[in-house]
Amino acid sequence: MIMATGLRPPAERTKDLNFIGELLEKGIIKPVIDRKYQFEQIAEAHRYIDIGHKKGNVVITLVNNIKD
């Protein structure tokens, strides 16, 4: 199990995050993204999360370049 918490020394967190990045690049683990919202839609994203039906992560994009 990998724990990237703020309580661990920065060097350990960096090591863990690099390891997770490698797993992502190799396709060993894949993030599950349920929906994507633009920053301007953040209230809508919160409402969606609050209904309790999300099946993955909800992504908030800070720039207007969302691609489905």
Image: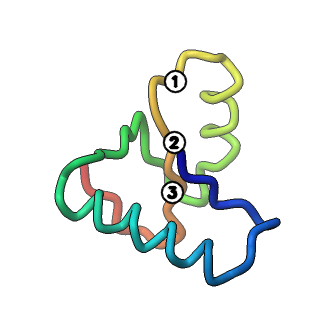
Above or below residue 11? Residue 66 is above
At a point 54% along the width and 69% down the height, the residue shown is 62
Packing grade of label 2 (10 A; few <14, some 14-19, many >=20) is: some
Q: Are marks 2 and 3 in contact (CB under 8 Å)?
A: no
Q: Nearer the viewer, residue 50 or 28?
A: 28
Q: Is residue 63 left or right of residue 23?
A: right
Q: Is residue 15 left or right of residue 7?
A: left
Q: Earlier in the sequence, mark 2 or mark 3?
A: 3
- Going by the picture, which residue comes out furthest to the left? 26
Packing grade of label 1 (10 A; few <14, some 14-19, many >=20) is: few
Q: Position of residue 26 (x, y in %)?
A: 17, 59
Above or below residue 58? Residue 40 is below
Secondary element type, mark 1 = loop
Q: Are marks 1 and 2 in contact (CB under 8 Å)?
A: yes
Q: Are marks 3 and 1 in contact (CB under 8 Å)?
A: no
Packing grade of label 3 (10 A; few <14, some 14-19, many >=20) is: some
Residue at the spot of label 3:
38
At a point 71% along the width and 24% down the height, the residue shown is 50
Secondary element type, mark 3 = strand
Q: Position of residue 4 (x, y in %)?
A: 64, 60
Secondary element type, mark 2 = strand
Q: Nearer the viewer, mark 3 or mark 1?
A: 1
User: In the picture, residue 35 is in which quadrant?
Assistant: top left
Q: Position of residue 38 (x, y in %)?
A: 51, 56
Q: Which residue type does callout 2 highlight?
A: Val
Residue at the spot of label 2:
58
Q: How is the image coloured?
A: rainbow
Label 2, label 3: how far apart the Cα atoms are: 11 Å
At a point 52% along the width and 24% down the height, the residue shown is 54
At a point 41% along the width and 34% down the height, the residue shown is 34
Q: Nearer the viewer, residue 37 or 58?
A: 58
Residue at the spot of label 1:
54
